[in-house]
Amino acid sequence: MARQAPQPSAYRPPRSAQELFARYTNGERFFAGSELIRAVLTGANLSYTSFFEAHLTGADLAGAVLLAADLTRADLYRANLHGADLNGAILTGAVLLAADLVTANLTGASLTGADLRGANLRGANLTRADLTRADLTRADLTDANLTRADLTGAKLTRANLTSANLSDARFDGAIFQYCVLSSIDVSPLSSADPPLVHTGPSFVDFDTVIQSVRLPASRLEDFLTRAGVPSIASIYMIEAAQAASGSVFDMMRSTFISYGSPDEKFAKRLYEALHKNGVRVFLFSEHAEPGEKLHRMMRKGVNEHDRVVLVCSKNSLVRSGVLNEIELTLGREAREGGETLLIPIRLDNYVFTGWQPPREDLAEAVRERVVADFEGADTDPAKFDAALSNLLRALRIKGGPPTTSGGAGP
């Protein structure tokens, strides 16, 4: 439903900058429908005002302060908003075609359905901005800060995202075509749900692959190929990036995740979170090679990784494959002088209250350790992050820098 602006009795919109300033000084804040085409409003403080459906085509608002201003459906075609402060402003459905928004502060601004075609947003702060269904065709977002911004359903045809900060931004169902994706971490793009709609190829450079290398290789490869990078080129770029950034993974112990297939969804989430935080991880569903014998592959995985994370649940602890992996790990511990290699994490209390494996010593060997608590983490992101942080500390190589959880991922 279209928003309706209240109409004060006998209201007449201002038709010049001088009239606007005079009325603002007298305490008026309602300027809906103003005819201020090419008005010079440089550096003006017009906070908490309503410019609902105002005509500001070509207006000079460089450095203006428009905190929480209502610019719903305002016409700002080719307006100069260079360095303007639009923190919390409402620009729903506004026309910002070819507008200059270089270094503008749009923190928390509502730009739902806004027309930003050809807009210059270089260095703009769009933290927590709502860009749902906005049209950013040919927009320049170089060095823009899009942290936690919502671009669900946005159109980014030929947009330039060079060096943009996309941390925790949402791009669910956004449209990408002929975009420049240079020197960015594409993690938020690869986790969009529904996924990005690639209606054509985009440019992706090697630095972007380097910055995104903590993504699981299969997910990064899938993103690159969907963006138009040939499959073989994607594989080579990822392998080269992994080799170039190997030091990222040198601070953490490599890890094998032991789990039963009913817990695969959790195991995959854990795998992605660990990988994002610099841990080399083996996960059966990601690394199993067709034709390889299962027992040989599991033995190799257990023996070649520094630690084995055991998913303890009623679903996993009854699986013969998991029991075999516990036996293999305990045998390796004995051969290596008693070093602790097995790290149990629990999804429920079954490991303590109901688990009775054929070999009682297996249960005893697991229960005598500190069991990391992931119970409820599958539905509580905060709990997952807290438990993940504890697990990362256990996997950190002594003498390395402190670890900081990068979050649960998608």
Image: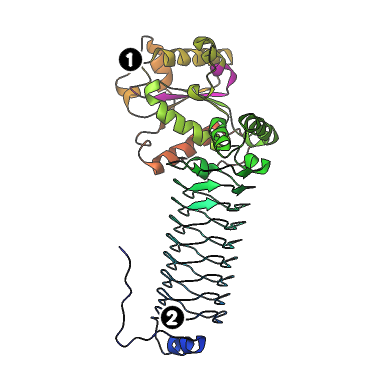
Q: What is the distance, in whole Å, between disc 2 and disc 1 at their CAs?
A: 77 Å
Of the 4 image quadrants, the one containing the C terminus is top left
> Is residue 308 covered in magenta?
yes
Let me know if residue 405 appears in the view: no
- Find numbered disc 1 in the image and state the secondary structure of the residue it sits on: loop
Q: Amino acid at mark 2?
A: Ser
Q: Identify the residue under disc 2.
A: 34
The label on residue 35 is none
Question: Where is residue 12 shown, x and y percent of the image?
Answer: 37, 86
Question: Where is residue 28 shown, x and y percent of the image?
Answer: 39, 85
Identify whether 218 is placed above or below 162: above
Q: Mark 2 against mark 1, which lies toward the viewer? A: 2
| Residue at position x 38%, y 37% in the image | 377
Report the span colored magenta: 301-315
Name the residue at the front extreme: 200
| Residue at position x 51%, y 40% in the image | 190
Q: Nearer the viewer, residue 340 or 98?
A: 98
